[in-house]
Image (spheres, rainbow, N blue to C red):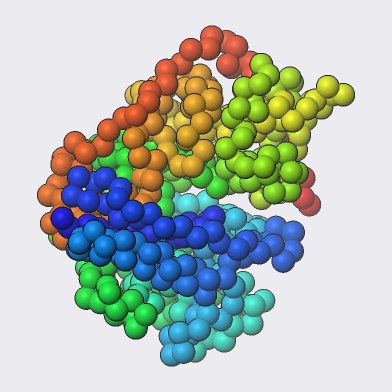
Amino acid sequence: MAHVIAIDAGTSGVRALAIDESAQVSHISYRELTQYYPQPGWVEHDAGEIWRFVQETLLDVTSRLAEDGQTVSAIGITNQRETVVAWDRDSGAPLARAIVWQDKRTAPRCASLRDAGHLETIRSTTGLVLDPYFSATKMHWLLDEGSLKVTPSLALGTVDSWILWNLTNGVFATDLSNASRTMLCDIDTGQWSPELCDLFGVPLDSLAEIRPSCGRFGQVAHLELEALHGVPISGILGDQQAALFGQACFAPGMVKATYGTGAFVVLQAGTTLPPISEGLLTTVAWDLGEGSGVSYAIEGSAFVAGAAIQWLRDELGILGDASEIEPLARSVSGSDGLSFIPAFVGLGSPWWDESARGALIGITRGSNRAALANAVIDAMAFEVRAITDAMQAVARDNLVELRADGGAAVMDLLLERQADQSRLDVARPISLDTTARGAATIAGLAEGVFESLEQLSSLWHVHSRFSPSRDAASADAAYATWLHALEKTQDWVR
């Protein structure tokens, strides 16, 4: 039986995952990435470690498939978006640590561009807001304050292009979904904008070629991956677009929420470029190539979701394992008046305030671990509600179902509260590995393993469904209290 392997290079770690012709997961291998925080607001990864873990997980999965007598038909790549890798195309060596999407070091640069009146040009060209979240100011920082030299061999790319370049021994390309997140891509033409490259001081020659998301990018040729030599890399998607694809959200109006390191809500907008929406991002969902046209999406991004659970575990020691949060939260009736604002690196949609910082408000002598666990889960649901409320305005109140995935979506309690807050049915699929599934299925579509989007829709199956059960007035009151607390955290860093 033919299998497709997905490389899922996320923020927390790297995994390789194999799916069969029924889109069922057969093998998974995972490595957790080292997180570097050299200064407050800075977040970095080791690009060499990312590539090493790609190799290790690929070899793990490939060897298990070989033991089962199975073959690999194609490879798909999905990745943390916006994160910037700089490397030398002659030596293959990274030139600096990767600057992660969460990193806020370029906030002053964004402020100066905003003050100079460039906000609307950037917004109308890219569909994005002027924020340190995106790649352009990170690339500028590496060239300016990072002291990288502009040479013919300089490569500035997103994580997908770094992985592809290594897999193929030199193909320097990216897909349109990733390019659309750099703040350098004209979302209307699907090409790099010379004007924006000039504005941000990024040389066009250092950027990867933009290609459709579905189609052959090259073949595996790396010396250490001999068992996969000749296997085509046939699909690339940014992680949130991959989750949208993996959730079979192919029709306009379908929406998914991924609860990973952050929480990301993406609305399928169809093949017509939608108008700019207040507080939300307009982005590319995917480009299937061969005349199929580009599909667009409207997105809301919350920077911290599952990362808050990691914070409870790693920094506060409240949890021994992330899985402990739900039983701890269920041991009491609620948050006991606590409001948690997870603005560790500012606020994303719909506020876009990089100066906000996290807070815990409403503490009393009786506040305890279980109340804090509830407050963290509540905050995840509130963040996503803020986004779905904004999307309902765009969709004219036509949203009825939210498809949930990501590591935190295993929690029934979270999805129950999400249904109550967003007033939507929340559907959890059988497999929560939808990001990797999306990368694998789009690659399989390119190679004929899967025949059509209709077939992929038929292979998506719901595991659990959660409907609103709390009184709407009570849910609204809790949300209003949280918003009141959130206002206290804004404009904190000056």
Locate residue 384 relative to residue 144 in the image: left or right: left
Locate residue 404 relative to residue 270 in the image: left or right: right
Locate residue 80 relative to residue 487 in the image: left or right: left
What is the x, y in percent for residue 378?
61, 28
Locate residue 320 relative to residue 133 in the image: left or right: right
Whether residue 356 is visible here, answered yes or no, is no
How many numbered markers are drawn? 0
Quadrant of the rendered structure where residue 221 is? bottom left
Name the outermost residue toward the front: 67
Quadrant of the rendered structure where residue 73 is? bottom left
Whether residue 371 is visible here, answered yes or no, is yes
The relative height of residue 18 versus residue 306 in the rendered view (above or below) is: below
Q: Residue at x 15, y 41 (%)?
A: 455
What is the x, y in percent for residue 477?
63, 15
The relative height of residue 212 versus residue 433 in the rendered view (above or below) is: below
Q: Residue at x 25, y 77 (%)?
A: 229
Front in this rendered view, residue 20 or 163: 20
Quarter holding the N terminus is: bottom left
What is the x, y in percent for residue 186?
38, 61
Q: Residue at x 18, y 49 (%)?
A: 21
Q: Residue at x 65, y 58 (%)?
A: 104
What is the x, y in percent for residue 453?
18, 44
Front in this rendered view, residue 399 or 465: 465
